[in-house]
Image (cartoon, coloured by chain):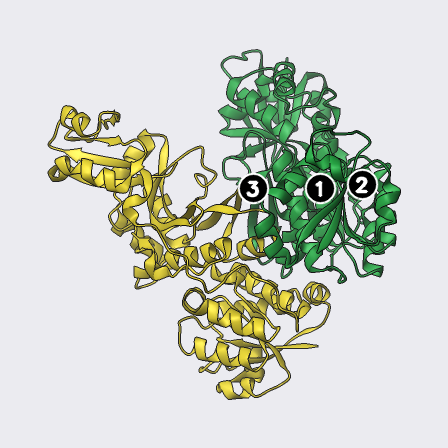
Chain colours: A green, B yellow
Amino acid sequence: MINIAVLGYGTVGSGVVEVINTNHKSINKRAGDEINIKYVLDLRDFPGDPVQDILVHDYEVIANDPEVDIVVEVMGGIEPAYTFVKRALESGKSVCTSNKALVAKHGPELMEIARERDINFLFEASCGGGIPIIRALNSSLTADEIDEITGILNGTTNYMLYKMSTEGCEFDTVLKEAQAKGYAEADPTADVEGYDACRKIAILSSLAYGRFLNYENIYTEGITRITPEDMAYARELGMTIKLLATSRKVGEDSFYAMVAPFLLSQNSPLFSVNDVFNAVFVHGNVLGDAMFYGSGAGKLPTASAVVADVVDEAKHLHRNIMMNWSSYPLNLMDMSEVEGRFFVRVKGTTVDCVKEAFPEVEIVNLKELPDEFAFITSTMRQGEYEERIRALADHIVTMIRVKD
Amino acid sequence: MINIAVLGYGTVGSGVVEVINTNHKSINKRAGDEINIKYVLDLRDFPGDPVQDILVHDYEVIANDPEVDIVVEVMGGIEPAYTFVKRALESGKSVCTSNKALVAKHGPELMEIARERDINFLFEASCGGGIPIIRALNSSLTADEIDEITGILNGTTNYMLYKMSTEGCEFDTVLKEAQAKGYAEADPTADVEGYDACRKIAILSSLAYGRFLNYENIYTEGITRITPEDMAYARELGMTIKLLATSRKVGEDSFYAMVAPFLLSQNSPLFSVNDVFNAVFVHGNVLGDAMFYGSGAGKLPTASAVVADVVDEAKHLHRNIMMNWSSYPLNLMDMSEVEGRFFVRVKGTTVDCVKEAFPEVEIVNLKELPDEFAFITSTMRQGEYEERIRALADHIVTMIRVKD
């Protein structure tokens, strides 16, 4: 019997208990042993809930019980999660977590402690909810050198952009709707400003390139300034707008990473990833294109990923599962050096003025917006774009990047 | 150092050598040891190719060399692959293969030998080329009870149907084009009749449901009778036609499986899987929907999957990786019990006659085909459909299943 303790009985924590109870037969078969939930830690009481019998309020009970083999941290936030997890690992208990903030900030240290003690610190649910992308990077795509990861990693913003695209609504309207449906939180900042996606791409990039990418160094731009007019242009171009979190290896030691809204063409497999779904596109030097698609959030899909980690840890109780992530820092190029194409809406200027600064562009007009027009630049360094756009500075309505 | 022997220096075999040479640094790091190609087995010589130095024509050399840890079987076909693989396993060498015919026919026996000897028999490349679906089923989706797998598992037919859909060409025309491009073989039977996809869905289903599904029991229908007119109807309905290989668990001990062309709506994540790409859709009882997308064939993507198996076997040299596949047979429902919807084109009859047999259907007309019309039935058992359609038997142009 393998004893686990679940820290936090919120949405994900109750999902973990539910999944283990629902599928206990097949889970025990996969794990090769019986998985027993010995404790659930929460400050609250849950009278009438069967979990009440195994509920503890004090982490000491779990930390000091040598029978606990695996600690499942699903509280979220940095503290006390970090202290609890570190203590569990230091006392020889494997840990799995859905906590992206914790992994993005303290991942290398916690992995190192697990490695030293021949136990495991796993975090499949921290990126892309139920999408099994971490294990794919870790143990499936091992023949490849990954040179790109691009994900739709935030379900809230993907839902909002999808609604704006298909129904033409304003950002504020669709945000209220998303909040009413429980897809967006009362304070939506972490989602709509791209902070959530930023931590996830930091984790995925660190695993793919084998170095620690500090999320604080990633250029991050949210979706708050995207309008129905931008969506109308996208439609006219046969494209759509998605919030992408992306990183690329462009040379032996040259990487860039960013989170930003992008215009995306129909050729991209990410084009059809709609509603609250997430997807991660990966390019390997021998594999070529691959994509992983699924529910990026939600109680049960996230719990499914957490429990898959529990099964993996049960199968490797005193054997570290190797991860390609060192504490050696991954340094990013200056954003001015990053190449791309840029979609620009301008007002109060002429096509001739635009062609003076950008001779090669094609002009896009929208019937419903007679006072303005737009264009997409050729591929150039962002620094060059900024230099060339200066002449049009007073006339820019908006700029959105274009995904190639 | 871990010594491997590659059986077969054809497309995949030369790809395996190329991948190991190209990415040797990162592969050795992932494997935790140096991967050395000690032998390549082929009946032919390759003068001038560096592989000539390690080429052997006689399998005995490999079988009798105790230094060979891993045998990579990429010859294809049942014999002599089966004999070679069995002998390697029996002498304690792990084996990985891209050979779907071998796995579909002898998988349970070979896995059992590996299990007994604490070595491994892996076959990531046998289904979906570079798509890491086998390892996902095996070690990622372990918290779930899978109740559906539906794949576009054959790149040749997906390319052909895509061309027929976008360019309106006839089956024969697009087959010749596919052959000219090297996407289809001179004898295209295994692809266009669905036999290739059939073996792959047998393997995936066996892993997902934990029982052995004999591919010979799977109803299999190819794409040879699909016409540009069918594609025109699909377009009119906002749908497309894809060759799907699908299996479903519909009750505690009730499964069905089939390979057939299906009309697919835009809501399906498989809708946008075009060209030679493959994808596998999986539904789990807690995970919900997930999809894995990538190159289903091709030298390097397939080799990428084979080499990922080599890395996994190097990391688990004398430790069996548990698989959820027993030799206990998975029995399929009778096809007449399988529920579905049916798209039917009829000629020389009236809407009234159709409504008499199928009161609930909606009628579809195509301007360019004034002599006929079509309809889609509601969901019913195939047996009921066959009974009800009998009245219209003389007027049926074609029937194609509809994917819900």
Q: Kindly indicate whether the residues beneath marks 2 and 1 are on one polypeptide chain.
A: yes
Q: Quadrant of residue A369?
A: top right
Secondary structure of the residue carrying numbered label 1: helix
- Binning the other alpha carbons within 10 Å of mark 2 as few (below 14), some (14 to 19) or many (20 upward) gives many
**Amino acid residing under circle 3:** Tyr
Residue A188, position as x, y percentages in the image: 72, 23
Secondary structure of the residue carrying numbered label 2: helix
Disc assigned to residue A102: 2
Residue A134, position as x, y percentages in the image: 67, 49
Secondary structure of the residue carrying numbered label 3: strand
Mark 2–mark 1 Cα distance, whole angstroms, equals 9 Å
Disc assigned to residue A126: 1
Mark 3–mark 1 Cα distance, whole angstroms, equals 15 Å
Q: Chain of mark 1?
A: A
**Amino acid residing under circle 2:** Leu
Q: Is residue A187 above or below residue A272?
A: above
* Labelled pair 3, 1 in contact (Cβ < 8 Å): no
Q: Pick the quarter of the image with the N terminus of chain B.
A: bottom right
Mark 3–mark 2 Cα distance, whole angstroms, equals 24 Å
- The residue that disc 3 covers is A293
Residue B366, position as x, y percentages in the image: 23, 28
* Labelled pair 3, 2 in contact (Cβ < 8 Å): no
**Amino acid residing under circle 1:** Ser
Say whether residue B74 is left or right of residue A31.
left
For residue B141, say whether it is visible: no
Q: What residue is at 58 percent from the left and 17 percent from the top?
A: A228
Q: What residue is at 49 percent from the left and 87 percent from the top?
A: B58
- Binning the other alpha carbons within 10 Å of mark 3 as few (below 14), some (14 to 19) or many (20 upward) gives many
For residue A163, say whether it is visible: yes
